[in-house]
Image (cartoon, rainbow, N blue to C red):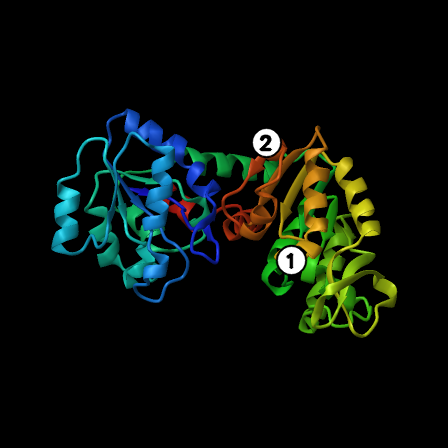
Amino acid sequence: LIRVDYNVSLNEQGTISNDERIKQTIPTLKLLLEKNNKLILVAHLGRPKGRDPKLSLKIVADDLHKFLPEHVITLVDDFQNNAGKAQLSSQQSGEIMMLENIRFYEGEKNNDPAFAKELASLADVFVNDAFGVCHRNDASVVGVAKLLPSYAGLLLEKEINSISSLLHEAKKPFVAIIGGAKTSDKLPLLTKLTELTDFLILGGGLANTFLAAQGYNMGHSLVEPSEENNIKEVYALAQKHNTQIVLPVDGVCAAHNDDQMTHICQVKNLDKDDEILDIGPETQAIFGNIISQANTVVWNGPVGYTENPHFARGTVFLFYAITQNDHCFSVVGGGDTIAAISQKEHLEKISHISTGGGAMLEFIEKGTLPGIEALKQ
């Protein structure tokens, strides 16, 4: 029984926009298949409320087949009913079974012991290769691991080793780049990064909130005013650990409710109708200079509203700045970040692309995850 993270991004047409998460599990699957194991894959897609045909794993099973064309891949609609049980009991050697979206079952998210036992009864051994859900206390992540001989897959091992190296043996200067919309989601992480890094570069809505806390008028930009006291604490910790917090000095702005007409604006004299939606050229130069001198870089979260190409340039610039630094160890993670850079050349120059956004951040913050601890037990 293998827990994989196939929670891929879907286009509006319902097709897969990026199957990197599927591709990264192939070494584990091939290794197990070479040893003549029968594989049952467990995965989820999205956050369904009950059964939702739009979030069926059929599209994922079809995509997986292109990586393993010599194997039959069968989607089991419901492993709990007689038809599903018959499919599983008649599994042929070399045939891969994939259970339908595990979040269609109520027992998954609340880690129901009876549901975990039912899952565990399908197999002799459990392999967790789903780093992206290791921060969840779900039945298929934590529950099953307590009931079967359990192991980490090759991808999970690679994730643990790469991110652990940031925590324990990062070469200085160590630069963290944190973007995204909300400060409140990332406060524990920012606190931890003040201990680890030399430079903490902030972008996106997160940076707007830091700028607002310093008294800048942010116009119509996305800001969380309630975070001011927490931000003061982050600055105090940064000072204590001699970490420099680096904020944007300019941005690509649009008038509120009109994101077609863009202009460059200085942070210090924003118009009341301006909305910052990306970092500007001066900020790119400052951030790029710091990245060029780094020996370790970790990046999570875009620094602009990347869904609109007008505001994706800053994020793409950071990607190229990292890939052009040939002496740094770099780790990049987070769904939105990966989506913004996935079609770019030089991806191989990133030392490690993490398949988990939330899991990566929580691992940096806490040094372990429930899914990893369950395997240790």
- Label 1 Cα neighbours within 10 Å, binned few <14 / some 14-19 / many ≥20: few
Residue identified by numbered label 1: 308
Point out the frontmost of discs 2 and 1. 1
Residue 76 screen position, x and y as percent? 23, 49
Give me the C-alpha separation between circle 2 and circle 1: 25 Å
Count of marks, rendered view: 2
What amino acid type should be assigned to the residue bearing mark 1?
Asn
Q: Quadrant of the C terminus?
A: top left
Q: Amino acid at mark 2?
A: Glu
Residue found at x 67% / y 73%: 226
Which picture quadrant has residue 248? bottom right
Given the current orientation, which residue lies at the most extreme right position? Answer: 269
Q: Residues within 10 Å of mark 2 (few under 14, many from 20)?
A: few
Identify the residue at image location x=82%, y=68%: 216
Residue corresponding to mark 2:
348
**Towards the viewer: 240 or 125:** 125
Observer-nearest of 78 and 154: 78
* Secondary element type, mark 1: loop
Against 326, residue 286 (above or below) is: below
Tell me which numbered mark, 2 or 1, is placed earlier along the sequence: 1
355 to the left or right of 89: right
Residue 373: image location, x then y, percent: 41, 46
Expressed as whole percent of the image width and height from the top left, the position of residue 342 reads 57, 42
Q: Secondary structure at mark 2?
A: helix
